[in-house]
Image (cartoon, rainbow, N blue to C red):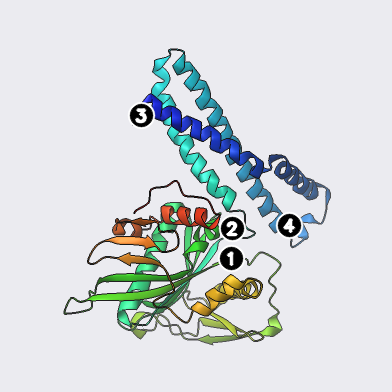
Amino acid sequence: MINIQPEELSAKINEIAARTESFAPAVKEQELAKRIDEIDALSLTDPQFWLKRESKTLLKEQAKHKKFLESWRKLKEQGEDILVLRELYKEGETEVYPELIELTLQTESLVQNFELALILNGKHDMNNAIVTIHSGAGGTESNDWADMLLRMYNRYAEISGFSFELLDCIYGEEAGIKSVVFNIIGDYSYGCLKGESGVHRLVRISPFDSQNRRHTSFASVFVAPDIEDEPEIEINEADIRVDTYRASGAGGQHINTTDSAVRITHIPTGVAASSQTERSQHKNKAHAMKILTARLYELEMSKLNSEKEKLEASKSDIAWGSQIRSYVMHPYKMVKDLRTRYETSNVDRVMDGQLQEFIRSYLLFSAGIASTGESGG
């Protein structure tokens, strides 16, 4: 049991109450409840509702609002329970103190999570995330770094309760991967991971260098929302070219003897996507279409958003000056986000998928909110 002195506990309770009160104007509880009822009414009164394309989007919106309001009401309820317990303690019922500590710490965590829920209000934040990793210049060393990042995000998905689906992978000739595309499936996975887009830099003693010299490697990460179920990106069959070819695995070894790999090219834009991870050509085509849709969405957004245009321009420069995060394993240990300045010396923990504090600090930073989490100096 964590031991907290009464003065410190009281300060925590006051902060929880103040922050919860500050959230109220942004929650818009009545508006969200009204919107939930409107969608319910549509589903009950419109006989064509379930046949319409937008029905899935509306139900997804409704589920998002319901989950958000449930979190808000739970936070308010626990906040009220804390105040009741504190009054009981002040009146001499000291046996409630352990329960008061436990509930306060639980609610403190709810406050932090709800703060992020308020920030994750973008149109596609609740969607699944399609993540692409490309190794930078440097051959085997960079390919291995890209493979390490792949494992890191796979572990992050597992820790966070998300599902992981490999969509496409091109292996390096000796080790690692040249590029990979995967889907992280779960509510708000895109909202959480969107800040991972950019160049990631590794400094370490290379395991591939017989002279044990220090090497610097780069890999780029790009995150797009999975929007295959949403109507704004429509792909005309006449605008795409589908090519099939024989899939290959690590070291160039064929993983099957049929032309199951699929590459789809969107002719008007030249955007292409491929998949070779499945033995079924049909499944690979579905994966490639998912990737293509995400890339076309990113292309549309880049036309409307000058910041995204800058990001697109940086894709060809996976090197110095464009990195967002540094992972140093030698001569000291440190992972540092160059935007938020958040850092930790526990590199192994980060590489094992513990990205929550980096993600939280970036989301608060991007929303203009000072992070209250632990940070290096």
Location of the N terminus (image quadrant): top left
Distance between the alpha carbons at the discs numbered 1 and 4: 17 Å
Report if residue 163 is visible in the image: yes
The residue positioned 43% from the left and 14% from the top of the image is 93
Among the 4 quarters of the image, the one containing residue 60 = bottom right
Q: What amino acid is labelled 3 in the image?
A: Ile
Q: In this view, does 31 lie to the left or right of 267?
A: right
**Where is mark 4, residue-wise?**
55
The alpha-carbon separation of the residues under discs 1 and 3 comes to 44 Å
Q: Which residue is drawn at 63% across and 50% down?
A: 64
Q: In this view, does 247 lie above or below 115?
A: below
Give coordinates of residue 223: x percent, y percent: 52, 67
Q: Nearer the viewer, mark 1 or mark 4?
A: 1
* Residue 226 numbered tag: 1
Q: Do the residues labelled 2 and 3 touch (CB within 8 Å)?
A: no
Q: In this view, which residue lies farthest toward the left? A: 211
Residue placed at 52% from the left, 21% from the top?
Answer: 84
The reply to whether callout 2 and callout 4 are in contact (CB within 8 Å) is no
The amino acid type found where label 4 is placed reads Ser
Where does residue 214 sit, x and y in percent of width and height?
Answer: 23, 74
Disc 2 target residue: 125
What numbered label is drawn on residue 174? Answer: none
Horizontal arrangement in the rendering, residue 27 relative to residue 343 (left or right): right
Residue type indicated by callout 2: Asp
Check disc 4 and report its element: helix, strand or loop.
helix
Query: Mark 2: which secondary structure?
Result: loop
Locate residue 156: give its quadrant.
bottom left
In the image, residue 325 sits, relative to residue 28, either above or below, namely below
Q: How crowded is mark 3: few (under 14 residues within 10 Å), some or many (20 or more)?
A: few
Q: Do the residues labelled 1 and 2 touch (CB within 8 Å)?
A: no
